[in-house]
C-alpha cells in the first residue's frame, strides 16, 4: 500500500474513532458517575504516555514546564474533557459533538475581544454568521420541546467545555511548552486525573471500583486505547503525509459520525432541522478555519519579508 493510501486510511481511522468516542462516553456515563469515569480514563492514559517516554529516558520537565502543563491540564482535561463527559449525562452525544465542533469559532471571538487579535477578515465574519445560523437551526425545534430534567444544565456544561478547549488552544499557541508534545500530554492527563478524582470525591459522585460495570470498563478502555492512543498515532501520520486542508477534515467528520452512531446505537432522535443545522454549522466552522489559515500564512510571509 502506498504512503498516500495509508495516510487516507489514517485520516478515516481518526475521523471514525474520534467520532465514536462521544458515543463511548455516553455509554459509560449511563453506568457510572461521569467525573469518576473521566478521572479513570485520564489516569490510565497519562500513565501509558508517561511510562512510554520514561522507558525511552525522556528528560523530565522543569519546574516551570510542570507549572505550565498543570495550568493547561485545568483547561484541557478538567474543564474541557471532564465537563464535556459530565454534559453527556443530560444531552445526546450527537448534540454534544456539534457544540464541541464550534471551538474554532470561539477561538476567533476570544482572541478578538480578550487578546487584541484584530486579524479578522470578511471570510471570518461570514463563517461566524453561518455557524450561528446553523446553531439556530439545531436548537429551533428543541426550543419548543419538553426536555428531561438537567437538559439546559447539560447544554451549559457542553458550552463551558467547548470554551475551555478554545482557551486551551489559544494558550498552547501563545505559551510554547518546550516538552515533547505527547510526554507533556501524559503529564496533563495525570494532573487532570488527580484533580478530577478530588472533585468527584468532594461532590460525592463516585462509586467503588468494584461496582463499576463491565460496560463502563469497556467504554473506558476504548476511550484510552482507541481514542487517546490509536487515533493520535493515525492523526499524526495523516498530518505528515496529507495536505493540511485535507488532514483537518476529521474535525468536520467527527460530529457526523457521532450523530449517526448515536442515532443507530443509542436511539438518539435526529430531525431534518438538526441535520441541516449541523451541516450549516460545520460549513461555517470550515470557512473560519480557512480564513484563519490564510491569515496565518499571510502573517508568516510578511514576517519573513521584514527579516
Image (cartoon, rainbow, N blue to C red):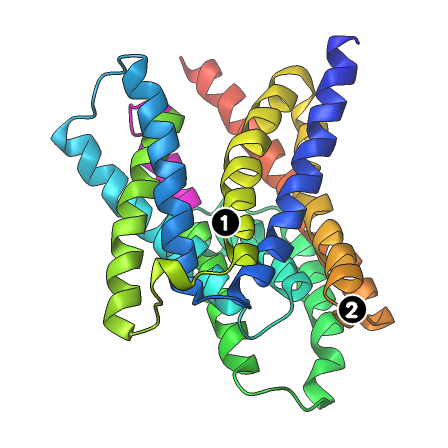
- Residue 84 image offset from top left, x and y in percent: 49, 61
The residue positioned 65% from the left and 69% from the top of the image is 92
Can see residue 247? Answer: yes
Alpha-carbon neighbours of circle 1 within 10 Å: few (<14), some, or many (≥20)? many
Q: Quadrant of residue 60?
A: top left
Between 52 and 122, the one lying in front of the other is 52
Instruction: Point out the frontmost of discs 1 and 2.
Output: 1
Quarter in which the N terminus is drawn? top right
* Distance CA(mark 1)–CA(mark 2): 29 Å
Residue that extends furthest to the front in the rendered view of this protein: 210
The residue positioned 40% from the left and 12% from the top of the image is 307
Q: Earlier in the sequence, mark 1 or mark 2?
A: 1
Alpha-carbon neighbours of circle 2 within 10 Å: few (<14), some, or many (≥20)? many
* SS under mark 1: helix
* SS under mark 2: helix
| 124 displayed left or right of 65 | right
Residue labelled with disc 2: 274
Residue that extends furthest to the top in the rendered view of this protein: 2
Residue that extends furthest to the right in the rendered view of this protein: 272
| 233 displayed left or right of 55 | right
Residue labelled with disc 1: 220
Q: Is residue 176 magenta?
A: yes
- Residue 7 image offset from top left, x and y in percent: 71, 19
The residue positioned 56% from the left and 25% from the top of the image is 233
| 166 displayed left or right of 277 | left
Can see residue 116? Answer: no
The residues colored magenta run: 168-180
Residue 192 tag number: none
Q: Is residue 286 magenta?
A: no
Amino acid at each position: 500500500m502506498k504512503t498516500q493510501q495509508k495516510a487516507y486510511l489514517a485520516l478515516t481511522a481518526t475521523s471514525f474513532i474520534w467520532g465514536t468516542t462521544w458515543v463511548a462516553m455516553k455509554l459509560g456515563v449511563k453506568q457510572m458517575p461521569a467525573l469518576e469515569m473521566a478521572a479513570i480514563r485520564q489516569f490510565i492514559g497519562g500513565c501509558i504516555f508517561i511510562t512510554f517516554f520514561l522507558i525511552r529516558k525522556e528528560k523530565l520537565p522543569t519546574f516551570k514546564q510542570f507549572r505550565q502543563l498543570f495550568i493547561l491540564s485545568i483547561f484541557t482535561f478538567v474543564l474541557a474533557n471532564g465537563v464535556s463527559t459530565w454534559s453527556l449525562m443530560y444531552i445526546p452525544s450527537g448534540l454534544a459533538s456539534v457544540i464541541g465542533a464550534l471551538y474554532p469559532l470561539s477561538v476567533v471571538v476570544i482572541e478578538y475581544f480578550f487578546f487584541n487579535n484584530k486579524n479578522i477578515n470578511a471570510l471570518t465574519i461570514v463563517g461566524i454568521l453561518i455557524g450561528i445560523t446553523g446553531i439556530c437551526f439545531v436548537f429551533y425545534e428543541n426550543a419548543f420541546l419538553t426536555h428531561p430534567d438537567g437538559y439546559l444544565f447539560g447544554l451549559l456544561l457542553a458550552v463551558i467545555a467547548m470554551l475551555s478547549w478554545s482557551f486551551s488552544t489559544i494558550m498552547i499557541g501563545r505559551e510554547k511548552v518546550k516538552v515533547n508534545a505527547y510526554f507533556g500530554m501524559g503529564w496533563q492527563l495525570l494532573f487532570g486525573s488527580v484533580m478530577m478524582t478530588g472533585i468527584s470525591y468532594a461532590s460525592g459522585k463516585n462509586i467503588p471500583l468494584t461496582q463499576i460495570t463491565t460496560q463502563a470498563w469497556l467504554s473506558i478502555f476504548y476511550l484510552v486505547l482507541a481514542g487517546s492512543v490509536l487515533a493520535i498515532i493515525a492523526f499524526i501520520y495523516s498530518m505528515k503525509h496529507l495536505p493540511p486542508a485535507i488532514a483537518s477534515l476529521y474535525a468536520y467528520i467527527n460530529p457526523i459520525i457521532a450523530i449517526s452512531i448515536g442515532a443507530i446505537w443509542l436511539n438518539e432522535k435526529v430531525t431534518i432541522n438538526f441535520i441541516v443545522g449541523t451541516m450549516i454549522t460545520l460549513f461555517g466552522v470550515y470557512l473560519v478555519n480557512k480564513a484563519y489559515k490564510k491569515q496565518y500564512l499571510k502573517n508568516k510571509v510578511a514576517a519573513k519579508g521584514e527579516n
